[in-house]
Image (tube, rainbow, N blue to C red):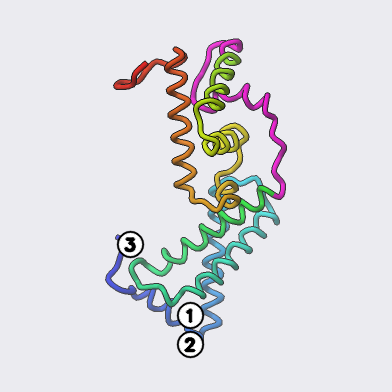
């Protein structure tokens, strides 16, 4: 298990070298930066972001550098309730998300509303058998989005599901958490499904009224 009773041996060593009075403080900082950079690079690769080569590596360096500043500023708050590397990992993940979000909005593609709406049935997991059915279904979903969702749900649904805006970009712009965005999208999908069931385009699930 990751939780420990006070700092474990490795975590205690990190705390020692990050003390400015430590004789090997500079070497400790270099090791920490190397670890954070490796995490940032791995996370960027894992997320399959639309940047690569020097641009992706630059984002990794930015995320690692800012994460390191945040860690050093808050190291006094570390209480050993998790391993130091786990605690530090969260700072890197946060910075990677922030960097990806800001990067997206600097080069965001223009949305193509009509073409995107035509592709919507596939994106919400409905597989119509004919092109005419697809167009009809897209029109029903579009009406459900306009009539059944709150303005906030509608904005997030169109951006994330329709236009393909990365979740990190929305969180960075709005200053909100991934969980809050997930909840809004879940509620939006539930309302849209209810509209499709009510109009006979989807069969009701067990316990779900038609």
**Segment tinted magenta in the rendering:** 106-133
The disc at residue 22 is 2
Would you name the residue on which mark 1 appears?
Answer: 18
* Residues marked 2 and 1 touching at CB (< 8 Å): yes
Give the residue at x 72% y 37%: 110
Q: Pinpoint residue 81: horizontal percent, then vertical percent.
A: 33, 68
Would you name the residue on which mark 3 appears?
Answer: 2
In the image, residue 121 sits, relative to residue 59, either above or below, namely above
Q: Pinpoint residue 24: horizontal percent, then vertical percent.
A: 51, 85
Give the residue at x 61% y 56%: 99
Q: Nearer the viewer, residue 65 or 41?
A: 65
State which tag comes first along the sequence, 2 or 3. Answer: 3
Q: Pinpoint residue 65: horizontal percent, then vertical percent.
A: 60, 68
Quadrant showing the C terminus: top left
Give the residue at x 33% y 21%: 208
State which tag comes first along the sequence, 1 or 3. Answer: 3
Secondary structure of residue under mark 3: loop
On screen, residue 163 versus residue 42, left or right, reads: right
């Amino acid at each position: 298990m990751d939780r420990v009773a006070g700092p474990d041996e490795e975590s205690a060593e990190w705390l020692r070298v990050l003390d400015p009075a430590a004789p090997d403080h500079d070497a400790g900082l270099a090791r920490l930066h190397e670890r954070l950079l490796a995490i940032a690079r791995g996370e960027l690769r894992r997320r399959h972001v639309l940047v690569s080569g020097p641009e992706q590596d630059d984002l990794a360096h930015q995320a690692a550098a800012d994460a390191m500043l945040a860690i050093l500023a808050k190291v006094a708050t570390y209480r050993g309730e998790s391993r130091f590397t786990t605690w530090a990992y969260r700072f890197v993940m946060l910075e990677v998300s922030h960097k990806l979000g800001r990067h997206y909005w600097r080069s965001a593609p223009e949305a193509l509303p009509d073409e995107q709406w035509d592709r919507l049935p596939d994106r919400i997991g409905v597989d119509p058998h004919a092109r005419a059915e697809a167009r009809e279904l897209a029109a029903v979903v579009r009406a459900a989005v306009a009539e059944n969702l709150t303005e906030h749900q509608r904005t997030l649904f169109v951006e994330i599901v329709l236009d393909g805006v990365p979740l990190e970009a929305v969180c960075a712009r709005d200053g909100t958490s991934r969980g809050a965005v997930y909840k809004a999208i879940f509620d939006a999908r539930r309302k849209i499904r209810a509209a499709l069931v009510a109009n006979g385009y989807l069969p009701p699930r067990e316990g779900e009224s038609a």
